[in-house]
Amino acid sequence: MEREEKALDVALDAMISRTQDLKNSIAGFIVKLETEYETLQWPSVLNSFALLSGQLNTLMKVLRNEKTPPLRNRILLPLFLNPERDEELAKTTENRIQFFNHEVVPDYLRTKPDPEVEATELQINTKANQMSLDAGQKQIASLNKIVNTIETVLKTTREDWESTSSQRSALAQTSSLADTNALIGALSTGKGLRPSLGSPKSQSPLPTAQPRGAKAFSMHPTGKMPSAIKTNIKSAGASHPYGR
């Protein structure tokens, strides 16, 4: 009896340790998603998932170990129920369970899953027992092949990402962020632009308006009137209408 109790204590300590590691990894991954979502890269996300998967597999190995006693055969009986808040229980469970009353005991101390889940599990176990050994081996080999293919694709993609990132970091920067911002400001708001200091172009004077009815004429290059214009000059006495 003491041997079984010691084996149970060792198994519980191992499960608590593995569960605590898994819990810390999940909490760290959640913090990373909430605080580093702007700079988070896919390789870092895949590394976090790989860590969680490895820790979960380690916990499952502890549960499936031959030295671990079957926990389904154990019965948990609550010895004391308290309707008031239990500070020690809240501290132990990190405020997840604050009351140990008749409402939470059936959920946290039950050893069997929901009836629907139990029926589904029984159906799966029955189907697995009815399958022949050869069919099971073929199905396992097929699933392993699919998993290996996915793993190869992920590794290849990860190597491509790492090589591309290293090549980009090795290239020298050919642009200036300050110049780009200055150019955008100049094009959009005219920021930093100054008017030219040169003299404005001379404009040709506008032609002066002539009085209505006047005849426009141009001077001859030699200073004489054009020959096309004829004059009729008479003496003043002959042309005066009134005699003196």
Image (cartoon, rainbow, N blue to C red):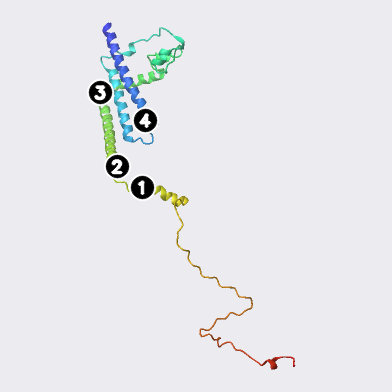
Residue to which mark 3 is pinned: 133
Label 2: which residue?
169
Front disc: 1 or 2: 1
Identify the residue position indicated by label 4 in the image.
32
For image coordinates 43% across by 13% down, the residue present is 87
Marks 3 and 2: CB-CB under 8 Å? no
Residue 37 sits in which quadrant? Answer: top left
Find disc 1 in the rendering and name its residue.
176
Which badge, 3 or 1, is on the more N-terminal residue? 3
Residue at the image position 41 percent from the left and 47 percent from the top: 181
**Residue visible at 27% across and 43% down in the picture:** 170
Question: Distance between the Cα atoms at labels 3 and 1?
Answer: 67 Å
Q: Disc 2 on helix, strand or loop?
A: helix
Between 30 and 224, the residue placed more toward the observer is 224
Q: Which mark is residue 199?
A: none
Q: Quadrant of residue 95?
A: top left
The disc, 3 or 2, on the residue closer to the chain's N-terminal end is 3
Between the residue at mark 3 and the residue at mark 4, the CA separation in whole angstroms equals 45 Å
Depth check, front residue: 128 or 88: 88
Q: Earlier in the sequence, mark 4 or mark 2?
A: 4
Of residues 224 and 11, which is closer to you in this image? 224
Q: Amino acid at mark 1?
A: Ser
Helix, strand or loop at mark 1 = loop
